[in-house]
Amino acid sequence: MTSTTPSREIWEQQQQQQQQQQMMMKMKMKNSGMQIGYSGGIGSPGPGLDENEKDEEISRSVLSAFRAKEEEIEKKKMEAKQRLQAQLGRVEEETKRLAEIREVSQSHGFGYGVCFWFGLIKHWLVVMENKT
């Protein structure tokens, strides 16, 4: 038995929804008698295209829309990844600052408890400063 992560399950659900939407769009266009012309525009049924050609044009259009959506999702993923990396960088900087504060406090003979609270206060001051 394999387990899937929640993000994998969400991705699979999104894929299923996209496939259903594509099929519905294809069926709506087919049932309405509309077609995608070779020029790429939507028009009324043309006398020169048979059913297979119409299906191929619709499939190309749906595939193009799907690829555009995939690109949009990929772009959003990259933006989220960049934001996460920036936040991790800030966390690393704060960790270094807290370590320096602890080291200085301990070298001055403060107990661990005082050092902890001093570091925590310093941390929150920096956080509040960054929010403004």
Image (cartoon, rainbow, N blue to C red):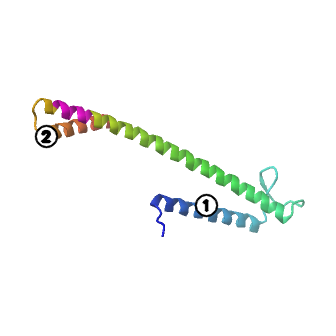
Q: Which residue lies furthest to the front in this view?
A: 1
SS assignment at label 1: helix
Q: Identify the amino acid type marked 2.
A: Tyr
Q: Where is residue 80 in the image (x, y as percent from the top left)?
A: 47, 45
Q: Give the range drawn in magenta.
A: 97-104
Residue 52 is inside the magenta segment: no
Q: Earlier in the sequence, mark 1 or mark 2?
A: 1
Residue 18 - label: 1
Residue pictured at 90% horizontal, 59% vertical: 48
Task: Report if the CB atoms under discs 1 and 2 are less than 8 Å apart.
Answer: no
Residue pictured at 60% horizontal, 51% vertical: 70
Relative to 93, 82 lies left or right:
right
Res 19 seen here: yes
Q: Nearer the viewer, residue 110 or 66?
A: 110
Residue 112 - label: 2
* Prevailing secondary structure class for the magenta stretch in the rendered image: helix
